[in-house]
Amino acid sequence: MAKVIFWEKPGCKGNTLQKEILIASGHELDVRNLLTEAWTEELLAGFFGTRPVEEWFNPSNPQVKTGQIRPAENGATEALSMMTYEPLLIVRPLMQVDDERLAGFDVQEVHNWIGLTLESFGERDPKNCPCVVAS
């Protein structure tokens, strides 16, 4: 069991499912609001590690969906600056256990990191957020 700090967009159905899976897997959650956190570029960078910048962005964000923002065309510095200004651009959730951080909810990655009871969510896809984000 891990104590997971879990940053979410309140009301997001995808984040609700992800929290259900973590709790069903025996983890304790400290849920925080992604939108009101005082993000810095340095703090955010720690969640993304060596992932490509394109994976840092929330694919459900309207600006990303419409092509107004093209994640693959941004460098790390530009992306982090955009995200500290507009947290809705950040892929969700952001999670932290002790000093380790992770962005997004790839089932296998989270399972390898802290362990999941994989049968706890059946056919539901916890990676992709089904909610529509207001701009």
Image: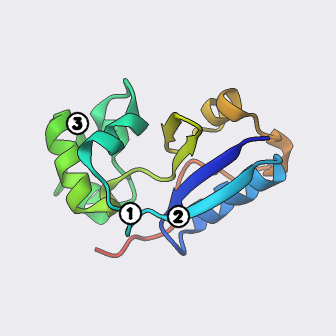
Residue 112 higher or lower than 87, as above or below: above
Residue at screen point 55% across, 43% down: 96
> Residues under labels 3 and 2: Cα distance?
28 Å
Q: Which mark is residue 72?
A: 3
Q: Is residue 134 left or right of residue 120?
A: left
The kind of secondary structure element at disc 3 is helix
Q: Which mark is residue 59?
A: none
Label 3 or label 2, whichever lies nearer to me, is 2
Residue at screen point 78% across, 51% down: 121
Q: Quadrant of the C terminus?
A: bottom left
Where does residue 85 sit, x and y in percent of width and height? 20, 61
Q: Which mark is residue 37?
A: 1
Label 1 or label 3, whichever lies nearer to me, is 1
Quadrant of residue 11 within the rendered picture: bottom right
Whether label 1 touches label 2, CB < 8 Å: yes
Earlier in the chain: of badge 1 and badge 3, it is 1
> Residues under labels 1 and 3: Cα distance?
25 Å
Check disc 1 and give the amino acid type: Glu
Q: Which mark is residue 32?
A: 2
The kind of secondary structure element at disc 2 is strand
Q: Is residue 24 left or right of residue 57?
A: right
Check disc 2 and give the amino acid type: Arg
Q: Is residue 105 visible?
A: no
